[in-house]
Every structure is written in C-alpha cells, then in structure tokens.
Amino acid sequence: MKLSILDQSPISTGQTPQEALDASVDLARLGDELGYTRYWIAEHHDFSGLACPNPDVMLGIIGSHTERIRVGAGAVLLPHYKPFRVAETYNLLATLYPGRIDLGIGRAPGGSAEASMALSGNFLENVRQMPDKLDELLRFFRHDFAADDMYAKIRPTPVPEMPPQPWMLGTSEKSALAAAEKGLPYTFGKFMSDQDGPSIIKSYSEKFAEQHPDKTPEKIVTVSVICAETSEEARDLALSPLLWSIQRDKGEGDGKVPTVSEAKSYDYSDEEKEKLQNMKRNLIVGNPREVKQQLDQLQSEYQADEWMIVTITHSYEARKKSYELLAQEILSDS
C-alpha cells in the first residue's frame, strides 16, 4: 500500500501562521524520510485557520528541504488563473526539482464569494470555462497547439526535461469522468465527500479504459486519519478537529484548531452532538493496527493505487507522530 500526505497547513490555537508553515515544511521532511510517496499542500483563501493561500510558493521551499518525495499542489484552483501562468510556474518547479513535481487541479473556489471576486472576478463564469482552461493548460505542457493557434509560437519557459504530472482532483463523479476523458490520473477526496466513492472510482476506471486503452488509470483516495499509540489517545486527539469544524460552520472562535481540553469542555448542543457522530464516520481514528485494518477494508472497496492521508490535530508533534506510526505499520515492510 502506497501512502502520501495532504497538508492543509492548519493553524493551531496559540500558534502563528509562520509556525504553521514551518510545521508544514517539517512534515514534508518527515514524509521524505519515512517513505511517503508524495506530499501535497492545499490552496485556501481568506481562511483564518489555514495558512497557505499559495501552494506554488510553499512548494519552492519544500522542494529545497526534501530529496526524494514528490511534491505538489492539492490543488491549484484553476478557475482563478490563466493556464499559461500555471504552466510557467510548474515548469519552473519541475526544472528545479526534476521528476518530483505534481500539479493537482481543482475547480473549487477555496474561499468565500468575496475572496473569489477579489481573486478572479466572476467565479461561476470561470468555472464554466474550466474545461477549456484545462485543455489549454495541457496543451501548454505538451506544446501541441495547432499551427494557426495564437499560442502556437509561445512556450511556458523554462521547459523541464521531465514535465510536471497533472492530476485531476474532485469529490464527485463529474470530476472523475472529466479526468478519464482527458486521460489524467484522478484523486478522490473521500475526506470531504458524502458520495459513493467506490462507484465514482469504478466509473473513472471504466471510462478511462474505454477512451485510453493504451494507458493505465491511476487513482488516489484521500482520507482523514488520526493515529496514536492507543485508541483512547487517538479519540482524544480527534476531538480538536471535530470541534474546529463545528466552530467554523457557526462562525465561532478565531478559526484556529482548538486544544483537546477545549474540545472536551465545550458545551455541545444536541444538534452538534449529532453532527459530531456524522463527521466521525468520515474519519479514521485508532492505534496503528486499527487504522491499518480500516484502510485495508477501504482498499477492498476502492482498489486505489495509493492512499493520501490528511491529519489535523492541535499538536503539530501529535500530527507528526500519527504519520510516523502509520508509516511504521504500513510502509516498513514495503
């Protein structure tokens, strides 16, 4: 089983954005040492609890602090940007770090409507243009515009020997089928989707095989995991991100991940208790053996090529420990 890391750069109570970003670099270094396949960092805008609005900048730093692990965006939110600019940026990264750059592509806004307007104007119109933008981006990487196309004479320089690997990210069948149509590898965000993931992955694989019989579909599934030495410790650690989600939805607090003690002492309403139970269904929590068992069960349902792990805890050290324990349980024999 291959494992990878998705990092959202969460800011914990009592910590600064700089400390959160430093912790992200530290996590990427750890993933490199432990044998994780890739490290991706997410893009969010005007989000007080998440520290990274620009994966491109962070990847330039993270690449210089790692040696083997693939690094990439999870995802660049393409509706906000011109494809040529994205191609230039990721060609530059792929020139700096040959054979290690992934370009995850998403279409979510990554923030509020106001933030989207400030970034790129009419976001809904930009989403409507997403298929064309994606085609244009891929053509810039392949340099296969028609001779009479206005972009045929330009290149997104520098042109690396090994181009970045585009991935389509999504949480629905629509994104999966779009990835299959374009012949792109696909990452399904199970941790933020309530849809039938196994069916979505199956649809992707079938349509990919139908349209690209000479290629092999690649599938990553992303899940939320909190792993600790004991089940009880893992359940305690999980209280922080669960309360964080509730507070975000209610507009409470400062947007940062609360402590375990804050989560334990919080006065949950009956409605919030029910919501907690629902959220727990999409979260893998336990000791290393229990987490592996849950991942093995999911693997039997999804037949994924790789599992991407997102872990949010108040303690950055507990987060690192979670990834360490998981690597020891799953990657040590691979």
Image (cartoon, rainbow, N blue to C red):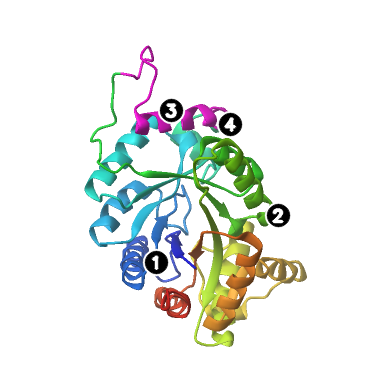
Q: Which residue is mark 1?
A: 36
Q: Please tell me whether mark 3 or mark 4 is closer to you in this view.
A: 3
Amino acid tagged 4: Leu
Q: Which residue is mark 4?
A: 124
- Between the residue at mark 3 and the residue at mark 4, the CA separation in whole angstroms equals 19 Å
Residue 166's x, y, as percent? 42, 43
Residue 126's x, y, as percent? 53, 30
- Between the residue at mark 4 and the residue at mark 1, the CA separation in whole angstroms equals 36 Å
Specify whether residue 208 is painted magenta: no
**Which type of secondary structure does the marked residue at label 1 adopt?**
loop
Residue 82 showing in the rendered view: no
Where, by quadrant of the figure, is residue 139 drawn? top left
At 62% from the left edge and 51% from the top edge, which residue is drawn? 201
Amino acid tagged 3: Glu
Residue 15's x, y, as percent? 39, 69
**Which type of secondary structure does the marked residue at label 4 adopt?**
helix
Q: Earlier in the sequence, mark 2 or mark 1?
A: 1
